[in-house]
Amino acid sequence: MPNPNTITRREILRTAAFGAFSLPLLGSIGRAAAAPSAPLAPVRPERLRLGVASYSLRNLSLDDAIATVKTLRVSNIALFKNHCAWETASVAECRAVGEKLKAAGLALTGSGVVNLPNDEAKCRQAFENVKAAGMSTMVCKPDIAALPLVEKLVKEFDQKLAIHNHGPEDKVYPTPEVAWNAIKSLDARIGLCIDVGHTARFGDDAAASIKKYAARLYDVHMKDSVAVVGAQKDVPIEVGAGRLDVRGMLRALIDVNYKGVVAFEYEKVAGNPVTGLAESVGYVRGMLAGMS
């Protein structure tokens, strides 16, 4: 089956709003993060809210991750535990991180996957931490037995959650459908974070899942992969260079009038993550610009 992204990839990258090689060297990124920040101006009005999951930049410091996201001219960030340990940090530490992001002109829209065990003290700590930081949606993985407790805390903290699916090797939430069946009777603030790569690797249609669960789709992890269906390990690659139907997923998000963030989660190990992330963002921007 031909790759649905290959035909227009070169043209899209040629006209993309951001080129991979226009990024500054990492040596200067930390200094940029510390500088006073004006509100970020998007390259052009965008049809979807783009963001970055900082797992993409997990080997960088928080300051360098912030500066990279700003250089991409993206204003939304979801923080991985390397940049803020949501499960174990203090409220004061998390509040300080939230204030740092706000000062940099970034909105804290999500997290790396926060584990929520059936333990009220541990769950409450995570809820207190994300609330202190001003996070709009906690991306998480609750134990099935913890769901009644989690629902209670959602109501108490008025906190939106998005349960993340992790593909064939995930024994709890492998697909959006499994996550949906676990939470559909719970408070509407508990929804889904559809990871499009893991969804496709399981063998499900990510675009169809976006449409089916649109009413409680609160986050999307955007990526691409060359892994085959059923693979127990992902093989990530720059968005547009893999097997996923990126155009179909973007069209589905537009069709359902998705208001959440499309967070790029670039997981490829080899090479410079900043360059690969920039190429991925530029590819999606170019494709969105060309869609009617």
Image: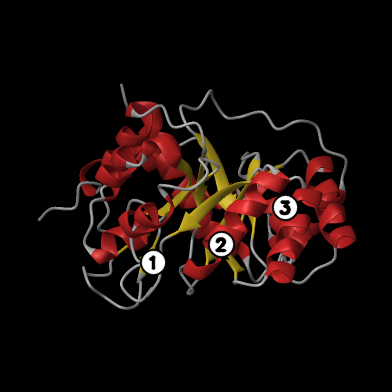
- Near-viewer residue (290 or 232): 232
Q: Quadrant of the N terminus?
A: bottom left
**Residue at 67%, 67% in the rendered image:** 81
Where's residue 135, x and y in %? 70, 47
Labelled pair 2, 3 in contact (Cβ < 8 Å): no
Identify the amino acid type marked 2.
Ser
**Residue at 45%, 36% in the rendered image:** 285
Q: Secondary structure at mark 3?
A: helix
- Disc 3 from disc 1: Cα separation: 23 Å
Identify the amino acid type marked 1.
Pro
- Near-viewer residue (104 or 173): 173
**Mark 2 crowd level (few <14, some 14–19, many ≥20, 10 Å Cα):** many
Q: Which mark is residue 56?
A: 2
Asked whether residue 32 is in view, the answer is no
- Disc 1 from disc 2: Cα separation: 11 Å
Q: Which mark is residue 66?
A: 3
Q: Which mark is residue 236?
A: 1
Q: Secondary structure at mark 1?
A: strand
